[in-house]
Image: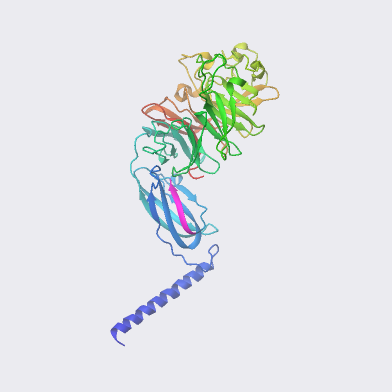
Amino acid sequence: MSGRNRDAGVAIMKKALLLIGCCFVLSVMCGKEGVDPLITFDFKEPTVVLNPTGVAPLCAVATYTSDAQGKTKIIVKGRHGPNSDIEHTFNDYGLIHRVIIAGLYIDYDNTVVLSTVDSRGNVITDTTIHIQTGPLSDGLPASIDVNVAQNDTMGNGLNLVSNHVNVPSKPLFIDRYGDIRWVLDYTGHSELGSMKYDCGITRLRNGNFFFGDKASNKIYEVDMLGNILNRWELSGYAFHHNVQEKPDGNLLLTASSSESMHLDGTAATNDFVIELDRAAGNIARAWDLKVSLDEYRKALSTNAVDWFHGNAVIYDSSDNTIIVSGRVQGVVKLTYDNKVKWILGPHKGWGTNRSNEDLNRYLLTPLDAGGNAIIDTNVVIGNADHPDFEWNWYQHSPRIMPNGHLLLFDNGSVRNYYFENPVHYSRAVEYAIDEAAMTVRQVWSYGKERGAETYSSIISSVQYLPETGHILFCPGYKVANANGMGGKIVEIDYLIKKVVFEMSICSQSGWAFHRAERATLYP
């Protein structure tokens, strides 16, 4: 045998032995629980594209194929150990995969473990990739500081912050270590380059995000990469502040109408609620608040044009009603035919509506801790506080808790009608409302004990965290922090009123955010 033939024979024998060895390994693996037999594990290196839309600089898209049927699992390795990892398993079972990698750090060489897992969750194969991000443009907070973080007791998720430093608004996900892990930056975008979403961005039940944009006067649905999936016109109305999804998928929002007029012929604004039929794209219903309420009440404001200033609306599925927050009037519950069910607010100055109904009959009577009616007139009309009860002042962000109680951010801007009061405080406050007895009892509050250090005269939000039963208390405007003015995100253990997480966010303007909420990065 010549040398050349001998070498060729050796090569063939090596390949045969390698093939036999691979078959042996495969047979052993197929005998193990959780591994599907008769497949090969040929993992192709993924193709990774950073920021494919141009508006999501901390996201990438990875595509790859594998001979092994499976789902993709990613882990974006955190800079602060496992608690800072972003981990997600996709529903993409098959051979061809295209997944969004979110949770990258700014200007950083990010390490991402990308795996294929079988139907039982076992890792078939994995690879580690590196994604280098760049610096971000302006319009971000000047500083983010974590003051308290008790990782063993605080709730999971990241903080979805409706950041409002400048235009366009740039929503952020900020983790528990104060690192920005997601941002939508529409700077230079042909449609959303001037986006101003007022009360902010939140998530639809389908996992996408939605917000109202004052600049274009549309409601938008976007995905995690910032792609515009849907937009809805507000024919005849102008978006003002808040938009919420109903259980049937329709959208409720506070709005203005260019044709809104008081009975005396003077202009009015920010005094409509509308329901947008999400499927048909038209206005399904409108509530003119001048019809149901006292459009001339001036107990909290002498501004006859912006007499109500609707800043939030939510749907109450228990009785098919809406609950509307009017910054300078109070909180009202309305039926679908625009009839008042109750009014939560100090009793001073209420008259009649356009149907000549005396609105005093709808005012909720405050109770003390023992369930007795408070009869002190100064407390009832709002001139003074009771040890067990305080009214809501310039409130925002109504939420219905699982127990049926109403949770509010009580800004306290004109508390007890002191417009120039040097002592201010904001509160997260929980009220129990008995609609049959027409009473309200203050059940829980937090913030008064913090005084000016958590006071926000406008905007801001609260949230109940069902996983832990904690309350998220988020004053967002000109809060005095250690490094400047801005806002705070404070998570409170409800039972013992202990702070388990606190983050301070500062900006040059003093605007930190319209609202903030705890949410998962992936739906």
Q: Is residue 97 shown in magenta?
A: yes
Q: Nearer the viewer, residue 66 or 295?
A: 295
Q: Position of residue 512 (x, y in %)?
A: 42, 30
Pick whichever, 74 or 233, lies toward us: 233
What residue occupies the far top of the structure in this picture? 377
Which residue is rendered at x = 38% and y = 29% of the image?
A: 507
Name of the residue lying farthest toward the right:
436
x then y, percent, for residue 110:
37, 48
| Residue 43, quarter of picture | bottom left
Between 80 and 172, the one nearer to me in the picture: 172
Toward the bottom, the furthest residue is 1
**Residue 388 shows up from this direction:** no
Q: Quadrant of residue 183?
A: top left
Q: How is the image coloured?
A: rainbow
Residue 220, position as x, y percentages in the image: 48, 38
The prevailing secondary structure element of the residues shown in magenta is: strand
Q: Which residues are magenta?
A: 95-102
Q: Is residue 283 visible?
A: yes
**Residue 22 in the image: above or below residue 467:** below
Relative to 288, is 383 above or below? Answer: above
Q: Is residue 505 found inside the magenta-colored segment of the image?
A: no
Q: Is residue 309 left or right of residue 182?
A: right
Q: Where residue 23 sits: x, y (%)? A: 47, 72
Near-viewer residue (291 or 204): 291
Q: How many marks?
A: 0
Placement of the N terminus among the 4 image quadrants: bottom left
